[in-house]
Image (cartoon, rainbow, N blue to C red):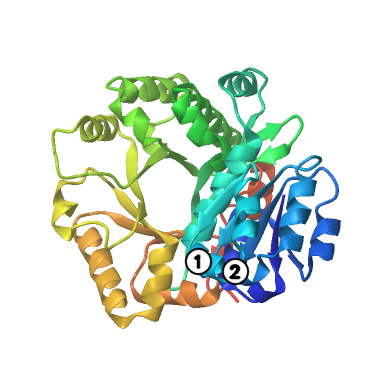
Amino acid sequence: MLLIASDSTRGSKALSDVARELSLTLTYFASAKTLAELMRGHSRRIVLLTDTDISEGVAACLSEAEANTQFGVIVAADRSAVRQSNKTATLERLANLHDVEWTEPGLDYERISDAARGCRRRMLRVSREDLLDAITNSELVVQYQPKVERNSSTLWQTREAEALLRWRHPKLGLVGPLEFLPDAEAFDLMGPISELVLSEAALQLIRWRNQGLALNACINLASSQLCDATLADKYAAIAKRLGLECARFTFEVSEQDLTDPHAPHLQTLAALREKGFRLCLDNFRVAASSLSTFEQLPFDEIKIQASALQRAQDNPVTVKVLAAVTGLAHNLGMSVCAEGVEDTETFEFLKTIECDKMQGFLISEAVMPDILRKVYGPKRDIENVA
């Protein structure tokens, strides 16, 4: 899948980050003629247009390509301003394309990323039967992204890995979770899929143990699963059946409404923790939560969102807030993990606020288990990442 952008977007870090996170190849075009050449073939593509890219030639090229190619279009422009520039007919032609996402002008990472995910999901067009076949035919595979954990101020070790689901689609190749898991949740299939991931991760821990590698696993839980009062019992039974302690697994859940201590999802989290599982509050955005709720959270760890780290490095006030959050978490017995660590500057910054764990492309992308075993063995320590 390609993300095709014009020369006017060259050099944008946001686009590079989106392409990397969503496994897109970033390609540029400078004219409608070049775009037409890039649109040939059967690969799925996403075309990004800014206000300067909107032209009749580009719209005509995309309209013609629909007959033979699957693609989505992201229009990052002020529609009112474009209409006032006598491009109303061109905008209408773009609006008639099958897969279009409209977003505000500017290349904001989160907006472009959300739009790209929307385009990809529509291109995939997943049905419930497709997902059931994927489960039955063992098309769902698990990759693992290592985390490094601080042993001292300079020494970091790999002790756990996050299990990340992929769909090895028989026609489309390897498909990322953001393209099909929202549909799986809508079809009420997250239960069997998560049990599959837990079972596979447990078996993989056993394989690694037999190969001399002692790791724990982190597994994501969908919010819809937290209303299942039997979840803790089912997951504990899976771990027991395979002879593993529940403490070997950390379940990561996204930040939710935490104001009601009697909410069903909080009761489910408490039950998981009582069984011995560890819990991590994922995608923690610092400003999105009240620090006063920390003492009520049934979590062992918080994972700071990558965008919060980026804001902190550019804002001295945010740095102080992030350091305060880390200190409070430590005082409450929680560890702090940072996701999306991609450069040495972020790595060094996180050491200054005493972050406990890190994961991201600087450490490793998600890999197949055999690669992780060879590269991230128990003796792999990180002192100075260069």
The kind of residue tagged 2 is Asp
Closer-to-camera residue (314/107): 107
Q: Residue 330: image x %, image y %?
A: 24, 61
Please state which amino acid type lies under the numbered disc 1.
Asp
Quadrant position of residue 167: top right
Give the number of marks: 2
Q: Residue, x 27% and y 79% (percent of image)? A: 317
Which residue is the site of mark 2?
51
Marks 1 and 2 sit apart, C-alpha to C-alpha, by 7 Å
112 and 24: which is toward the camera: 112
Q: Is residue 320 left or right of residue 81?
A: left
Q: Residue at x 79, y 47 (%)?
A: 65
| Residue 385 image position (x, y, % from top left) | 57, 73
Q: Specify few, some or many for label 2: CA neighbours under 10 Å numbering under 14, 14-19, or 20 or more.
A: some
Tell me whether the residue at label 1 lies in contact with that at label 2, contact meaning CB atoms closer than 8 angstroms. Answer: yes
Question: Which is nearer the N-term, disc 1 or disc 2?
Answer: 2
Q: Mark 2: which secondary structure? A: helix
Residue 78: image tag: 1
Q: Quadrant of the C terminus?
A: bottom right
Seen from the viewer's position, the closer of residues 176 and 117 is 117
